Amino acid sequence: MKGKRYAELMRSLELAFEAVPPRDSNEAQEELRAIGLDPVQFVLGLAQALRSKWATVTQVGEQLTGGRKGQDIMATSLNSAVTHYNFDDRKMRWFNFGDFKHFVFAMCNVDLERRLVDFILKFEPNEQIFLHRHLALTNTLVVQGEHRLYEPNGRLKEIRPTGSYTSTPPGEPHREGGGNEGAVVFYSVRAGDGDVLFEVLDDDLKVVAALNMADFIKALEEQKGS
């Protein structure tokens, strides 16, 4: 009964927020300045006050629901007020990477001094790209869709949903791809002292090609000049 009362309280708070009409950001800032308030300081102060209020509500919820359950209800209520976005790539230019199939990519940057290579891949739905092995530390962020990793024999190994951040050292041969809606994944590769970032393998796990810093520098220059 207490848990139900708490859920009803949280829903009433959600409805109160939904009842407030949206305001244009610039207009709101001008109104605050007109009455002598700094918009940034006002928002910071309001955020601090809200955090204090929410903390109090959370404590009440824990008392009513017995602890963890109250926290879960609180998290659900806060998440419902967050705006969710889909990645819009209509202004991006995607390029093929040689003859490789089932993905396109866009270079972001190559930092020779710090040995960093950043790029974005866009995977086709339910396809697997070429078999390869990472030879450098690779950080990835799944921007949209499901990033899927496969064993060399094609068996599904791991699914990384939207928002997943992974830091992976050099490892075993694998394939990658997208889920039912494809995937967009940001890669940041730390080359370190080595020059080869990826090895391309055949089905017998033999190295047939290598992708190094020069390949990505060339790709970046070609994309900038296109």
Image (cartoon, rainbow, N blue to C red):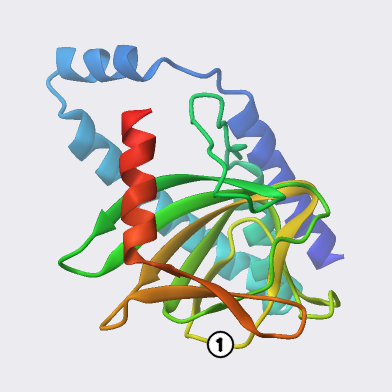
Single out the residue that lies furthest toward the front: 208
The x and y percentages for residue 196 are: 39, 76
Amino acid at dot 1? Gly
* Quadrant of the rendered image containing residue 113: bottom left
Residue 165 in the image, given as x and y percentages of width and height: 53, 67
Exactly how many numbered labels are in the figure?
1
Is 112 positioned to the left or the right of 137 in the image? left
Kindly identify the residue that appears in the image at 28 percent across and 56 percent down.
Answer: 110
Report whether 15 appears left or right of 33: right
Question: Taking 226 as reference, is 202 above or below it?
Answer: below
What residue sits 66% from the left and 39% below the top?
A: 14
In the figure, is residue 149 to the left or right of 87? right
Front one among 76 and 112: 112
Q: SS at mark 1?
A: loop
Q: Is residue 220 visible?
A: yes
Give the labeled residue for mark 1.
171
The residue under the point 20% across, 63% down is: 112
Location of the C terminus (image quadrant): top left
Disc 1 crowd rating (10 Å Cα; few below 14, some 14-19, many 20+) is few
- Depth check: give the residue in front, 206 or 136: 206
x 32%, y 30%: residue: 225
Left or right for 127, reference 162: right
* Residue 120 placement (x, y as % from top left): 50, 50
As drawn, 187 above or below 133: above
Q: Quadrant of residue 12?
A: top right
